[in-house]
Image (cartoon, coloured by chain):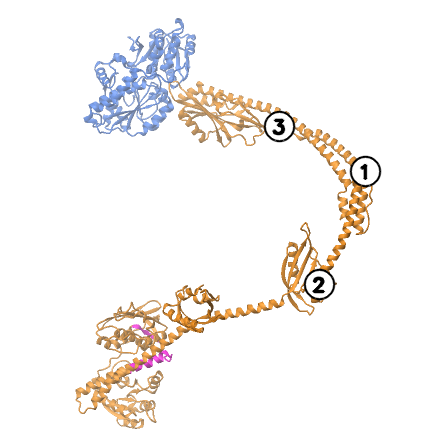
């Protein structure tokens, strides 16, 4: 490197180069000034030539314009044009030739047009047309009557256009016009020259390269002030080339001579200096020793040698001191607990302290160059190395953490810190760094973090907030999940109090005050309105008072849990329980109600000698009350079975018209009793559904019953059925007591019932609507209730899927003959319950039937064969031989094969009905069978009996 | 020859203008009961109103207005419709005249248009007149082709001189005066050529008179004496001049400046009487033997129509003497023509131009200023005047044109 520098700028060479450069510069100046002078003279000469040429061109243009102007003036005043203006005869023979003779002025084409007073063409010189723009310009001039000339833009570029008026002394207006134009491009004397005129901006390149000469204009065109603009004759470099070549050759010869002489002189003058230089090179190459520079040559060089010797002495001294310092530093570095190292400015570590070798178990040999990489974790080695390299490049102190392998093979995290050491000029001389084992600190931190995380997750899962309330400052701090629970957090206890529901606040405060006074705990459940969504939440708060060393209450720490879900569940449970209790109370009441008249009636019957009229009244009371109780129990059983999913519906195509008719018939007595007005809208024929006819009737009946019950006497009930493409909608509207908004959501729930009103004579268990909903749902339908409120009436709507077919109207049901026709009919009652059998027998006899009674199947069969009855009322649960078997036997005997068999039993399930039909029964009545039901059953005799007219269809089971 | 462009308006013209104004108003004053509120019948005049020093168009207007005043005073036409006069100026320029015809033709209520003095203008208008079928009444211009225009039916009528009659009359007059060698100095227009044809035709048949030479002057020429001298050199002892007032005045002044032996008689066509020829020629006029052809002179007019006319004139102008009537032929022709037109309109019962045109051929007679027309026109004759009316006249010392006693 030192050698290079010597070669690059030896003093001798500097002398030589500098003197040569100075000489070359002087030469260059001379050459340039000569060059400039020659060029300048040449340009001046060319300018004079160009000016002369431009003057000549301007004169040419001027001559052309003068000729044109005078020629046109002459033509305008000629008698030929004058005659042409007043006499059209033959003018084509003289006008056109005359004008055509003027087609060029000094070789420049001129366009001429001769017009009348209005600008209409009379003749032209046939050179070309005038544009509409030019003609309108002409007409404008004719209006003013003034001769004019202008420059107008045309598609051939700017052109000079002018008009000469043909005037007549006896009129005050121009009577004709001679208009002419010349294209400016044609007027230009040569291709380089340009024409400028008044009002037209001069060409943009207006500098000394252009020559501008005004054109002497004819009088009529004077205002246009033409100028000829021409570029200067270009200076040709080729012309001057020989002269410049001579200058260049002389200059180069001079430069060469100066260079050689300068080099020689430099060598001689620097001889002694070069000797001193070779000494100092030997000192540097050979290391520090005791050499001394020879003192010889010029004064300056001798003095320099002395100085060098003095400096060498000082360097020897300082070197010894430095060695000592270094020893002390190494001792210090080896005693500190950290691993320490020193690196060069390029980051290469060249020294490690003893602690390093102890911890890593490596040797200085292994650590050479970048040997330290082996103690880094293989997975992180590259990234750590890369980051260290970046920091070294930036030259700033840095810290980082990475694992280092110990002698035991285990990696421990180390915190590394390094800083550069700079010299006086700010250049980095070396790096000093330490690595500190931080494995224990990191473990402790991680444990704390994980514990906090678990606590936080626990709090969130439990919807629980933890808080700490400083009593002296009123400051309160919440765990981070508090906003999730409260909807807000508060900084002070006072603010937090305000969030508590005002009904609970006093209680809560008293509990807290008590805990503070007793240095104890509190546990309160209070309501709060969340400020973010205004929802009410239930919060359970538990707190413990913390006392200071003097026993004074200092703070309260506690938790708050959102227990809204629990509270709501408790409330729902409570409500359900309450409804059940109410229902049971009502059920008891409803069941007890008929018992009272029945009991009273029984007492009456016990009295001796009741007359027939009283007997009938009493039995009617009992019958009515028993009917009522039966219906209550049927409803109860039905609803229980339906809600428990024990009922299956037998689906068949059903016309809603039939359903409505059936239901109306059933409800009629109640409607009439309460003097309601029932309006049934006509049912559309396409209103058909797939369903269980009986259940559908039950749905409508219940809705109508409900309407009738909850409407004051003389109310109005409207039943309407509508059908569209895919559903049938049945609605029942009444003018009754309506449903309060609070009740509306629960109206279809079990045991729900409106409050009784004094005039409601009909009781009920509140099962009807629950049953309706269950049955509608079994039919894949929806039922909805609507009311505008109490005393505003109600509307119930049932929507069922429509069956897309029309059901052929079946024949009317056979009309049962009047019961009187049955008088004298022989009926056998078979029942092992003697009371039941006898009471039924009394009833039947009272109806006019001939009755025989049996209590066993075998005796009944015997007697039937002996005296075959027309009909049998058979109990199913007979001892030994049951009702089914008896029925089959009766069917097997010719005498009773066609008799009417009616099952009268306590079993009323679907399976029971199916079994009795299979056994040959015609009808199946469930006990207690009403008088009407018995009469109806007996009225429908078997078809083969020949006693009843009508269809062949089997009578429906009842 | 230079004229100043702005001629001072003479006092006489001012008076005339005032008179015309009162003429416009007077029909409504006198015949108000009959004509007020009715749609007017419009008569147009296409003339050289704006030509400096010219009085011919104004003379035609005076004649038309005088007749219109009389007609309106008598209760108008077609059940009380008044006659209204509209004028258009062509300043003797054909191009302007053609535009005027176009405008008149486009006005639906214009029934007919009276023409001015300049034959060249009317000749240039002919194609437009043929195209528009505008009823045109020539009361001064004399070129033959104006009436012999080839239209069928012919929508042009003339109550004026005809060149083919004027030239023979002038030549006969020369012959009478023993001026056997004539030179022609003509305007280089269709009018000039029309007269050349007429003169040559006459000379071909006459053995005792010859045309020694013909020279032409152009529009705007400022001197004519060179042409005159050429005729003189050719041996002419009289010059037949076909020119208008300005050029003629130039010639008269130039000839008057010549030595007496070079001043030969000049027989002029009548175009010179339509302007201020007398005033422009000045005293020079009486240094030259100058006579001019006329169709009519108020000095020869029948007494009864003249008196009526002068009465009317006194109501619409300041003119009280026949000597004060400028361009007298124009006034008289226009006056008579307007009356004949009125009769034709009455006859047609409509202002429809073709109907009125037809009716003009059917007017039986009219006793006018110039003569007793009986009938004025026929289907084959659209010229109201004939050779019998032609006469030569001279300018009196006071400038008034008077007939030369035969």
**Front-most of A305 and A774?**
A305
Of badges 2 and 3, the one in the foreground is 2
Q: Chain of mark 1?
A: A
The image shows residue A500 at horizontal and vertical percentages of 39, 67
> Could you tell which of marks 1 and 3 lies nearer the N-terminus?
3
Asked whether, in this view, residue B342 is left or right of residue A169, the answer is left
Could you say which quadrant of the image residue A51 lies in?
A: top right
Element type where label 1 sits in the image = helix
| Disc 1: which residue | A268
Q: CA distance from mark 1 to mark 2?
A: 59 Å
Question: In the figure, the blue chain has which letter?
Answer: B
> Which contiguous range is marked in magenta?
A630-656
Q: Chain of mark 3?
A: A
* Secondary-structure class at tag 3: loop
Comes first in the chain, label 1 or label 2? 1
Residue B361 position (above or below residue A449): above
The residue that label 3 is drawn on is A233
Other residues around mark 1 within 10 Å, as few (<14) / some (14–19) / many (≥20): few
Outermost residue, front side: A550
> Could you say where residue B151 lies in the image, as x and y percent from the top left?
33, 25
Question: Quarter of the image containing the C terminus of chain A?
Answer: bottom left
- The residue at which mark 2 appears reads as A334
Chain depicted in orange: A
Whether pointer 1 and pointer 3 mark residues with C-beta atoms closer than 8 Å, the reply is no
Q: Is residue B133 visible?
A: no
């Amino acid at each position: 490197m030192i050698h290079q520098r010597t070669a690059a700028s030896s003093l001798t060479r500097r002398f030589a180069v500098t003197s040569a450069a100075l000489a070359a510069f002087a030469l260059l100046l001379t050459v340039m000034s000569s060059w400039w002078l020659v060029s300048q003279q040449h340009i001046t000469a060319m300018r004079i030539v160009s000016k002369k040429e431009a003057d000549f061109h301007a004169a040419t243009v001027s001559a052309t314009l003068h000729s044109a102007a005078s020629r046109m003036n002459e033509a305008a005043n000629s008698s030929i044009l004058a005659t042409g203006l007043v006499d059209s005869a033959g003018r084509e023979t003289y006008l056109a030739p005359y004008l055509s003779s003027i087609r060029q002025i000094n070789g420049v084409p001129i366009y001429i047009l001769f017009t009348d007073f209005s600008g209409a063409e009379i003749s032209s010189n046939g050179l070309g047309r005038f544009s509409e723009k030019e003609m309108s310009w002409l007409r404008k001039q004719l209006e003013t009557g003034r001769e004019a000339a202008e420059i107008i833009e045309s598609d051939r570029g700017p052109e000079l256009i002018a008009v000469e008026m043909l005037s007549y002394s006896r009129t005050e207006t121009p009577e004709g016009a001679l208009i002419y134009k010349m294209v400016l491009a044609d007027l230009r004397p040569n291709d380089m020259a340009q024409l400028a005129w008044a009002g037209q901006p001069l060409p943009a390149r207006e500098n000394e390269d252009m020559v501008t000469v005004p054109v002497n204009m004819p009088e009529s065109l004077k205002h246009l002030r033409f100028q000829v603009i021409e570029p200067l004759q270009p200076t040709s470099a080729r012309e001057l080339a020989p002269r410049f070549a001579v200058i260049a050759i002389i200059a180069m010869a001079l430069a060469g001579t100066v260079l050689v002489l300068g080099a020689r002189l430099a060598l001689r003058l620097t001889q002694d200096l070069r000797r001193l230089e070779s000494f100092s090179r030997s000192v540097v190459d050979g290391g520090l020793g005791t050499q001394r520079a020879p003192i010889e040559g010029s004064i300056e060089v001798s003095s320099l040698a002395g100085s060098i010797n003095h400096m060498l002495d000082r360097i020897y001294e300082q070197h010894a001191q430095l060695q000592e310092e270094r020893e002390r530093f190494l001792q210090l570095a080896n005693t500190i607990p950290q691993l320490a190292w020193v690196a060069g400015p390029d980051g290469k570590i060249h020294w490690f302290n003893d602690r390093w070798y102890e911890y890593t178990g490596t040797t200085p040999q292994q650590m050479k160059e970048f040997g330290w990489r082996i103690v880094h974790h293989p997975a992180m080695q590259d990234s750590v190395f890369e980051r260290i390299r970046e920091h070294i490049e930036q030259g700033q102190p840095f810290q980082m953490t990475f694992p280092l392998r110990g002698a035991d093979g285990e990696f421990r995290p180390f915190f590394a810190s390094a800083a550069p050491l700079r010299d006086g000029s700010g250049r980095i001389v070396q790096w000093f760094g330490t690595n500190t084992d931080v494995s224990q600190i990191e473990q402790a931190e991680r444990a704390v973090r994980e514990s906090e995380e678990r606590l936080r997750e626990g709090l969130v899962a439990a919807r629980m907030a933890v808080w700490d309330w400083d009593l002296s400052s009123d400051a309160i701090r919440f765990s981070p999940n508090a906003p999730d629970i409260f909807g807000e957090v508060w900084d002070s206890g006072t603010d937090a109090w305000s969030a508590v529901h005002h009904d609970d606040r006093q209680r809560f405060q008293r509990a807290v005050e008590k805990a503070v006074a007793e240095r104890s705990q509190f546990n309160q459940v209070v309501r709060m309105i969340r400020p973010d969504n205004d929802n009410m939440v239930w919060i359970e708060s538990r707190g413990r008072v913390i006392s200071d060393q003097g026993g004074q209450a200092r703070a309260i720490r506690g938790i708050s849990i959102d227990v809204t879900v629990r509270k709501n569940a408790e409330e729902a449970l409570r409500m359900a329980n309450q409804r059940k209790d109410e229902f049971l109370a009502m059920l008891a009441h409803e069941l007890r109600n008929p018992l009272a008249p029945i009991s009273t009636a029984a007492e009456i019957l016990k009295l001796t000698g009741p007359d027939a009229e009283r007997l009938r009244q009493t039995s009617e009371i009992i019958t009515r009350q028993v009917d009522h109780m039966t219906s209550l129990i049927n409803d109860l059983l039905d609803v229980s079975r339906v809600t428990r999913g024990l009922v299956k519906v037998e689906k068949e195509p059903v016309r809603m018209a039939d359903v409505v008719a059936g239901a109306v018939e059933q409800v009629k007595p109640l409607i009439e009793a309460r003097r309601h007005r029932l309006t049934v809208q006509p049912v559309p024929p396409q209103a058909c559904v797939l369903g269980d006819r009986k259940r559908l009737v039950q749905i409508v009946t219940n809705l109508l019953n409900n309407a009738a019950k909850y409407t004051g006497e003389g109310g109005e009930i409207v039943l309407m059925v509508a059908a569209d493409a895919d559903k049938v909608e049945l609605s029942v509207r009444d003018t009754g007591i309506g449903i309060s908004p609070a009740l509306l959501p629960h109206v279809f729930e079990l045991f729900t019932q409106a409050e009784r009103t004094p005039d409601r004579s009909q009781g009920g268990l509140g099962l009807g609507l629950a049953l309706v909903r269950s049955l509608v749902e079994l039919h894949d339908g929806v039922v909805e209730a609507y009311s505008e409120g109490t005393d505003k009436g109600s509307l119930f709507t049932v929507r069922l899927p429509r069956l897309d077919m029309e059901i052929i109207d079946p024949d009317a049901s056979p009309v049962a003959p009047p019961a009187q026709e049955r008088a004298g009919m022989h009926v056998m009652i078979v029942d092992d319950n003697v009371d039941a059998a006898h009471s039924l027998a009394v009833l039947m006899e009272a109806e006019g039937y001939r009755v025989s009674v049996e209590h066993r199947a075998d005796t009944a069969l015997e007697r039937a064969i002996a005296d075959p009855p027309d009909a049998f009322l058979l109990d199913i649960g007979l001892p030994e031989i049951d009702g089914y078997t008896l029925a089959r036997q009766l069917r097997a005997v010719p005498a009773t094969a066609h008799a009417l068999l009616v099952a009268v039993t306590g079993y009323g399930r679907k399976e029971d009905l199916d079994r009795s039909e299979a056994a040959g029964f015609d009808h199946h009545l469930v006990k207690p069978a009403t008088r009407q039901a018995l009469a109806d059953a007996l009225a429908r005799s078997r078809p083969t009996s020949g006693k009843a007219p009508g269809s062949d269809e089997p009578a429906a089971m009842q | 020859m230079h004229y100043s462009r702005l001629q001072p308006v003479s006092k006489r013209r001012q008076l005339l203008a005032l008179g015309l104004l009162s003429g416009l108003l007077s029909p409504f004053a006198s015949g108000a009961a009959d004509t007020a509120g009715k749609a007017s019948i419009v008569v147009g005049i296409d003339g050289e109103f704006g030509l400096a020093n010219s009085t011919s168009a104004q003379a035609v207007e005076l004649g038309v207005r005088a007749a219109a005043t009389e007609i309106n005073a008598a209760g108008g036409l077609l059940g009380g419709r008044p006659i209204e006069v509209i004028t258009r100026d062509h300043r003797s320029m054909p191009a302007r005249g053609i535009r005027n015809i176009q405008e008149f033709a486009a006005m639906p209520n214009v029934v007919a248009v009276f023409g001015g003095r300049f034959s060249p203008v009317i000749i240039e208008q002919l194609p437009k007149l043929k195209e528009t079928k505008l009823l045109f009444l020539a009361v001064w211009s004399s070129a033959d082709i104006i009436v012999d225009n080839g239209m069928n039916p012919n929508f042009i009528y003339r109550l004026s001189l005809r060149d083919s009659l004027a030239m023979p009359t002038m030549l006969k007059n020369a012959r009478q005066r023993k001026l056997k060698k004539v030179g022609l100095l003509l305007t280089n227009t269709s009018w000039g050529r029309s007269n050349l044809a007429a003169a040559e035709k006459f000379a071909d048949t006459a053995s005792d008179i010859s045309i020694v030479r013909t020279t032409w002057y152009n529009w705007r020429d400022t001197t004519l004496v060179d042409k005159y001298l050429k005729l003189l050199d050719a041996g002419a002892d009289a010059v037949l001049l076909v020119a208008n007032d300005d050029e003629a005045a130039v010639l008269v002044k130039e000839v008057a400046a010549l030595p007496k032996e070079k001043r030969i008689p000049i027989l002029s066509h009548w175009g010179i009487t339509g302007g201020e020829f007398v005033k422009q020629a000045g005293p020079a006029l009486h240094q030259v033997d100058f006579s001019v052809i006329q169709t009519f002179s108020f000095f020869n007019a029948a007494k009864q129509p003249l008196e009526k006319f002068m009465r009317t004139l006194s109501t619409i102008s300041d003119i009280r003497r026949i000597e004060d009537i400028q361009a007298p032929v124009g006034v008289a022709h226009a006056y008579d023509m307007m009356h004949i037109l009125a009769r034709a309109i009455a006859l047609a019962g409509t202002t429809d131009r073709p109907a009125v045109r037809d009716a003009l051929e059917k007017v039986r007679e009219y006793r006018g200023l110039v003569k007793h027309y009986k009938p004025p026109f026929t289907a084959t004759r659209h010229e109201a005047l004939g050779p019998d009316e032609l006469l030569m006249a001279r300018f009196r010392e006071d400038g008034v044109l008077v007939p030369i006693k035969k």
